[in-house]
Amino acid sequence: MSGKVTKEMSIIDIVQNYPQSLEVFAKYGLGCIGCAAAKFENLEAGAKVHGVDPEQMVAEINALID
């Protein structure tokens, strides 16, 4: 089942619900656990700040979850 994670979800919610997502965040240089913005920033905003395609991250995270 894909589509579990969306780019609109907060980073902290993604990491808490899907710890395996840390692998993808680390791959793209998003140190999300230690970042205060993770509590209120969604995946799309975080990805764009780091110059990363949020759709690609969502696809990779969902592939890990499946």
Image: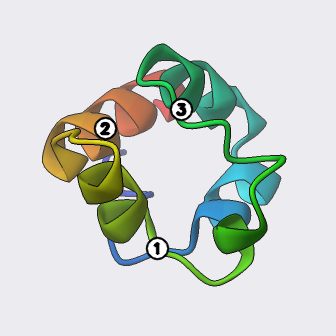
Label 2: element kind: helix
Where residue 59 appears, as percent x and y from the top left, is 25, 37
Residue 4 x, y percent position in the rendering = 43, 57
The residue pinned by badge 2 equals 57
Badge 3 amino acid:
Phe
Image quarter hosting the N terminus: top left
Q: Mark 2 to mark 3: distance in Å?
A: 8 Å
Q: Are marks 3 and 1 in contact (CB under 8 Å)?
A: no
Residue identified by numbered label 1: 42
Kind of residue sitting beneath label 2: Met
Which residue sits at x=80%, y=47%?
33
Of marks 2 and 1, which one's residue comes earlier in the chain? 1
Q: Are marks 2 and 3 in contact (CB under 8 Å)?
A: yes
On screen, residue 1 versus residue 42, left or right, reads left
Q: x, y percentage for residue 17?
A: 75, 56
Residue displayed at 75% across by 56% down: 35
Give residue 4's mark: none
- Residue marked by disc 3: 25
